[in-house]
Amino acid sequence: MAVAFEGLLGRAAPLPESDVEAFADFALDITYPPNPIRRVDNKSTPAQTRGEGFYRNFLSERFTAAGQNFACNDCHVVDVQQGFFGSDGFSTSRPGRFGGGDVVKIPHIRNVYTKLGNLESGPGIPTGDQYRGYFINHEGSTPTLFNFLSTGEFIFPGGDAQRKDVVEFVLAAPSNQAPVVGRQVTLGATGQAINKIMIGVLETQAAVIDPVPECDLIVKGWKGGNRRSWLRLDTGLYQSDRAAEPPVARTVLEEDAKVPTQEMTFTCVPPGSGVRMALDSDEDGFFDRDELDAGSDPYDPLSTPPPAPAAAIQDESGSNAIEQGVA
């Protein structure tokens, strides 16, 4: 990466090693967003389910090694628990396709939906203006996934119907973030009934931990003239940004939202980020509203409330409030 700043970007001198390391740390934290095609409850449609079954289980005689046939998933591994989204990082050599045996890294499939080159008037028949332009295949020569899977090396005993099912699965392939991440519902004085249904979906997905956690559910809003926030705990109750306040049920927040100007916005955020985004922005161990009440800056870890008497920071069981229920 370091050489690119001179050779590619035309910088006069190399970046300092510390800058390169800082940039690498930043880049390695970049992750793929939720797949917008996948259902918000992370359930598959019937076509996607059939396609996934074929993808994982059909052993094609076109893909063999040492006399063993392989399924799509044997190379393009989809295993959310291990963090594999169509590739486990290995490479392959396929003589006759990539210039006589070139070794290529097996690509993941979590971004295939972004590569569609044209709208289709029928299965695999591109029409209209190009609207993506990435295309599919290692050199970007194939406009649709159906076209790609229609080449001679792919076998579909069930014909085009089976091929279309695999297209449906791959386009909705799981990604690093669950589909619910980023979803928001704002609850106000009106229209609560329909919004409560969607909040129920957010709560259901926030409770999912198998095979991996899907999201943390936070709430932002105004109460009593102050900007407030809450985090849904594993118990289903909501902890506020004042540590001494006991967790409350969702119904309490719904009643607060009925007051004009006290709308409450529920948001599913990436798992593990809920405490930072709802309770302790600077991660210094003090809740945000407590810092504001004490005159310190909740966004500066070096600015903290003055020491309080021991009794003031202990609950009846002797546990520190920030450790209770949100750890």
Image (cartoon, helix red, strand yellow):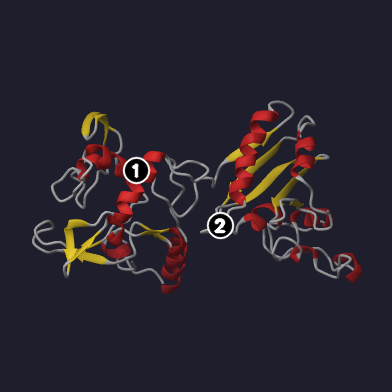
- Secondary structure beneath disc 2? loop
For badge 1, the amino acid type reads Thr
Relative depth, front residue between 69 and 166: 69
Res 242 → quadrant = bottom right
- Structural crowding at the residue carrying mark 2, measured as other residues with C-alpha within 10 Å and reported as few (<14), some (14–19) or many (≥20): some
**Mark 1 / mark 2, whichever is N-terminal:** 1
Relative depth, front residue between 297 and 255: 255
- In this image, 26 relative to 227: left or right? left
- In this image, 51 relative to 156: left or right? right
Res 243 → quadrant = bottom right
- Secondary structure beneath disc 1? helix
For badge 2, the amino acid type reads Pro
- Structural crowding at the residue carrying mark 1, measured as other residues with C-alpha within 10 Å and reported as few (<14), some (14–19) or many (≥20): some
Q: Position of residue 123 (x, y in %)?
A: 24, 33
| Residue highlighted by disc 2 | 213
Q: Position of residue 327 (x, y in %)?
A: 69, 64
Q: Position of residue 15 (x, y in %)?
A: 38, 68
- 297 to 268, vertically: above or below: below
Label at residue 255: none
Res 311 → quadrant = bottom right
Label at residue 114: 1
